[in-house]
Amino acid sequence: MSRPVKRSLTLQGHRTSVSLEDEFWHAFRDIAAERGQPLNALAAEIDESRDLDTGLASAIRLFVLRHYRDPA
């Protein structure tokens, strides 16, 4: 697994960054494409639904894990 890399996203008109490993970043992008969603829109959806005690990068990792672990 690779080391986390800081990447930029825009949420509600504000730039923010998350540190994700390449594997999680590519899976996150693939899921957004699969859903026909812009990456920032999917990030905003995850951001809005996460617990405030959970960082955005962790919430994205958990989203990716659940997507592949529990296919609908």
Image (cartoon, helix red, strand yellow):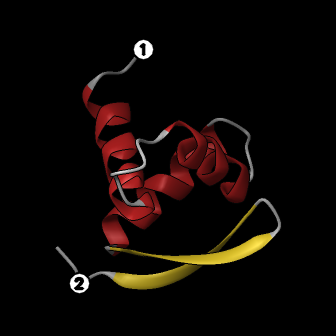
Residue drawn at (61%, 76%) of the image = 16
Q: Nearer the viewer, residue 44 or 53?
A: 53
Residue drawn at (44%, 59%) of the image = 56
Residue 43 at x, y percent in the picture? 60, 53
Q: Could you tell me which quadrant the N terminus lies in? A: bottom left
Q: Is residue 30 left or right of residue 10?
A: left
Residue 2 at x, y percent in the picture? 22, 80
Residue 65 sits above or below residue 59 on the image: above
Residue drawn at (28%, 41%) of the image = 65
Q: Is residue 72 left or right of residue 21?
A: right
What's the amino acid at mark 1?
A: Ala
Q: Residue furthest right?
A: 13
Residue marked by disc 1: 72
- For residue 3, the mark is 2
Q: Residue furthest left?
A: 1
Residue 23 sits above or below residue 47 on the image: below
Residue drawn at (40%, 42%) of the image = 51
How crowded pointer 2 is (Cα within 10 Å; few <14, some 14-19, many 20+) is rated as few
Q: Nearer the viewer, residue 70 or 9?
A: 9
Q: Residue furthest top?
A: 72
Q: Say which element carries label 1.
A: loop
User: Which numbered disc, 2 or 1, marks the residue that appears first in the sequence?
Assistant: 2
Q: Nearer the viewer, residue 71 or 54?
A: 54
Residue 40, image quadrant: bottom right
- For residue 33, the mark is none
How crowded pointer 1 is (Cα within 10 Å; few <14, some 14-19, many 20+) is rated as few
Residue 32 sits above or below residue 70 on the image: below
Q: Nearer the viewer, residue 55 or 4?
A: 55
What's the amino acid at mark 2?
A: Arg
